[in-house]
Amino acid sequence: MELTDGFKATLAETARMLRGSQRRLFMARTVQSLGAGGQRRAETEFGWNRVTIRKGMHELRSGITCCDAPRHAAAPAPRRNCRVCSPTSGTSPKDSVKRTHSFAIGDCTRG
């Protein structure tokens, strides 16, 4: 089956717009329609990852959706003007054992 450049671009753009299991299922169905050697062809012509295609093929065959990796939240913004960051309050007055708040101080002095 010969694919035109416009059709290739449409398939690649559609895959880029989808996320997670929807994207994998789209890729798997596209590869299935390409026939034998479809995974390798999709990898070279569309730039798709064969591991992702195989995962989508598994989901399509089994009907079970694989869990996606959790997305990492962006790093929190550095805190400014917080009480723990003052030069005199490196320990907690509430604790009977003095512990330093190095994690809080590190967050406050960064950036």
Image: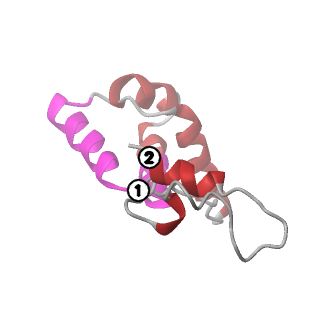
Q: Nearer the viewer, residue 53 or 104?
A: 104
Can residue 107 be found in the magenta stretch?
no
Q: Which residues are magenta?
A: 3-29
Q: Which mark is residue 27?
A: 2
Residue 15 spot, x, y in % from top left: 34, 47
Q: Main secondary structure of the magenta part?
A: helix
Q: Indicate the colouring scheme.
A: secondary structure
Amino acid, disc 1: Arg
Closer to the chain start, of discs 2 and 1, is 1
As drawn, which residue projects farthest toward the right?
A: 97
**Above or below, comparing residue 104 to residue 39 in the picture:** below
Q: Is residue 9 left or right of residue 63?
A: left
Amino acid, disc 2: Met
Quarter of the image that includes the N terminus: top left
Q: Which mark is residue 19?
A: 1
Q: Which mark is residue 29?
A: none
Name the residue located 57 percent from the left edge and 57 percent from the top edge. Answer: 104
